[in-house]
Image (spheres, rainbow, N blue to C red):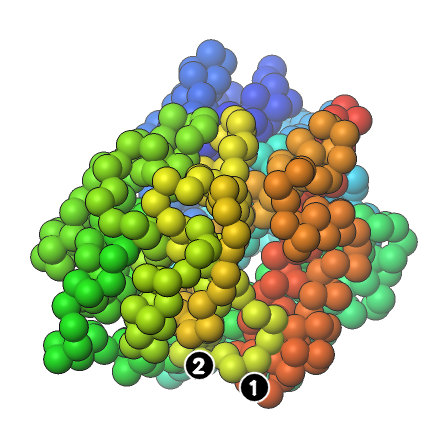
């Protein structure tokens, strides 16, 4: 017989399919969960599988803990992910091994093949098929190496291969896949740097070596050479799409090759970030000799766990009449920092519907200043900006002001590239952000790219605000993952309602939602920002920032396609 190990967290979309395919031919199934907040436990406990909680210890450590501490008693052990399904053909092949006496099988372990699905389509090329993973082994003969991500098993004995593939299809969707690769890229960047700097072989696991086996040579190349290439992400795309014939998978092969190439780019970018010393760039507080509270403006700063950004943001606001920090349940020192700087702290809890944070404040907070400035915690006002407000606000006829922002990226001030503007300064009582009746299109409790809809005209402040997020690239990618989910669902809703436009849309909004489904928007944005807007003059940070915007618009399109597939097609069969 055979025992099975499955590692889970929030796998309600997948675990039922996985367990159903294991029913009736396995002895014991252990599901080791690290704190699911969805229906994972309920689904598991409705079957014969055993649910075990264990706090997350890391990809390799979590599995090794289970192998060393749970009562595996069968001669064979199978490790499978919750988003993987054993097909009937693979089951028959495994059962043929189990039918023999354990001593009659010369191999200690077997590699299993996987067939990936991407956007409801199988990937049979791109270098992803066959995809061999050592998952089936005699009890006690294998352990995972000590590695943060992309860990491999170290086996005592001979190995062989089973031909029939299992299905790998994560039903949690594109947003989860992007989040997972965001986390993987951070861990991979750390592992690559650790491998480059290691003086000797690893404490446990597989050593990277040019003279070792195929896996050791591959690891050596990735640690020592691959991410020193001028553009490893381009190399990965050409390898997958051209050399490994991803074009034979049609448009899905192209999209998948671009998706994995974007992942490689994030690894390279995060390696640079790990080597970057950011401390000297923190903006200084405003000069105390400047006027205090002379600007008739209430600054509203929406926050959630912003202890890294908020001190610098608030230290620049001494000239504003009032500062209100609207918090959504921060678990770090955000609220204490706000109080230390004399800001009023307002608690907000979103119920998943309208209004979100900014509109909620406009509707529920009593403002006693004629102007309101919405400022994010990673935005920092300049002295020139404050001086212009002091000169213009008393006389302006406008109800709102468009503001421009200067981006810092990877510690460098970006002087070029596509301009970033927002309508974020409004006259009190002149309007509110556009109403969108959504049902939790994302987890963000604040307006994403909605604009204020005002009664009167709008003007523009020439002086800029600095924008620099000190929470790092992983936070940046996570935030834009949420943004892209929201944009995809908004586009789909606009199409469902009859067209990508609303009467109050700005010209830029009309153009964006008219083009956002087109394949050319993502590369077109990059070409305009990097070449026509001279982003190339900002060096590698300018290139990295422009390419991340390409990836962002590409992700929006992938999510729109995913929504269309969910509407038009059933999920793939696993039989």
Residue 538 on image: x %, y %: 55, 85
Residue contact at pointers 2 and 1, CB within 8 angstroms: yes
Assign the C terminus to one quadrant of the image. Answer: top right
Residue occupying image coordinates x 50% and y 79%? 414
Find residue 539 and name its label: 1
Instruction: Characterize the local packing of mark 1: few (<14), some (14-19) or many (20 or more) Cα atoms within 10 angstroms.
Output: few
Please name whichever residue, 509 or 312, is drawn nearer the observer in this view of the structure. Answer: 509
Find residue 412 and name its label: 2
Residue occupying image coordinates x 42% and y 74%? 463
Q: Quadrant of residue 171?
A: top right
* Secondary element at tag 1: helix
- Measured along the vertical axis of the image, is residue 485 above or below residue 537? above
CA distance separating discs 2 and 1: 9 Å
Residue 484 on image: x %, y %: 58, 47
- Measured along the vertical axis of the image, is residue 197 above or below residue 472? below
Residue occupying image coordinates x 49% and y 44%? 454
Counting every numbered tag in the picture gives 2
- Measured along the vertical axis of the image, is residue 274 above or below residue 175? below
In the current view of this chain or complex, which residue is farthest to the top? 46
Instruction: Characterize the local packing of mark 2: few (<14), some (14-19) or many (20 or more) Cα atoms within 10 angstroms.
Output: some
């Amino acid at each position: 017989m055979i025992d099975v190990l499955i590692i889970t967290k929030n796998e309600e979309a997948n675990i039922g399919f996985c367990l159903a395919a294991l029913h009736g031919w396995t002895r014991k199934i252990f599901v080791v969960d690290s704190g699911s907040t969805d229906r994972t436990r309920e689904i598991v406990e409705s079957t014969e599988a055993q649910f075990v909680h264990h706090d997350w210890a890391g990809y390799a450590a979590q599995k090794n803990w289970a192998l060393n501490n749970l009562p595996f008693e069968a001669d064979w052990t199978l490790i499978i992910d919750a988003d993987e399904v054993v097909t009937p053909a693979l089951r028959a092949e495994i059962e043929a091994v189990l039918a023999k006496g354990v001593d009659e099988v010369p191999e200690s372990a077997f590699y299993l093949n996987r067939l990936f699905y991407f956007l409801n389509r199988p990937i049979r090329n791109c270098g992803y098929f066959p995809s061999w993973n050592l998952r089936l082994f005699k009890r006690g003969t294998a352990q995972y190496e000590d590695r943060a991500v992309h860990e491999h098993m170290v086996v005592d004995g001979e190995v062989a291969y089973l031909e029939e593939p299992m299905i790998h299809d994560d039903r949690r969707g594109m947003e989860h896949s992007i989040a997972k690769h965001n986390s993987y890229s951070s861990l991979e960047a750390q592992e690559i740097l650790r491998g480059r700097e290691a003086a000797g072989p690893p404490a446990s696991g597989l050593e990277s070596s040019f003279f070792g086996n195929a896996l050791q040579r591959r690891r050596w190349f990735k640690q020592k050479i691959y991410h020193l290439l001028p553009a490893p992400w381009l190399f990965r795309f050409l390898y997958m799409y051209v050399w490994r014939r991803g074009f034979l998978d049609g448009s899905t092969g192209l999209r998948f090759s671009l998706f994995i190439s974007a992942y490689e780019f994030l690894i390279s970018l995060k390696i640079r970030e790990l080597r970057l010393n950011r401390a000297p760039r923190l903006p200084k507080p405003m000069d105390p000799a400047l006027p205090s509270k002379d600007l008739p403006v209430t600054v509203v700063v929406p926050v959630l766990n912003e202890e890294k950004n908020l001190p610098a943001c608030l230290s620049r606001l001494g000239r504003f009449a009032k500062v209100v920090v609207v918090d959504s349940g921060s678990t770090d020192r955000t609220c204490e920092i706000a109080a230390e700087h004399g800001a009023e702290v307002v608690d907000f809890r979103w119920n998943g519907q309208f209004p979100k944070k900014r509109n909620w404040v406009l509707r529920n907070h009593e403002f006693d200043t004629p102007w309101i400035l919405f400022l994010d915690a990673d935005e920092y006002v300049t002295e020139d900006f404050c001086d212009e407000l002091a000169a213009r606000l008393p006389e302006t006829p406008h109800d709102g002001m468009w503001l421009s922002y200067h981006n810092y990226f990877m510690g460098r001030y970006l002087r070029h590239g596509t301009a970033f503007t927002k309508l974020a300064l409004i006259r009190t009582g002149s309007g509110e952000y556009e109403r969108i009746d959504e049902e939790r299109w994302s987890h963000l409790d604040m307006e994403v790219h909605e604009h204020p809809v005002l009664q009167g005209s709008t003007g523009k402040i020439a002086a800029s605000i600095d924008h620099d997020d000190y929470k790092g690239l992983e936070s940046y990618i996570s935030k834009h993952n949420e943004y892209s989910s929201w944009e995809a669902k908004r586009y789909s809703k606009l199409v469902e309602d009859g067209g990508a436009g609303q009467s109050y849309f700005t010209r830029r909004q009309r153009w964006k939602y008219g083009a956002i489904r087109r394949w050319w928007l993502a590369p077109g944005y990059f070409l305009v920002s990097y070449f026509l807007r001279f982003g190339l003059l900002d060096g590698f940070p300018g290139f990295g920032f422009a390419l991340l915007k390409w990836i962002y618009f590409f992700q929006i399109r992938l999510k729109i396609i995913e929504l269309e597939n969910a509407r038009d097609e059933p999920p793939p069969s696993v039989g």
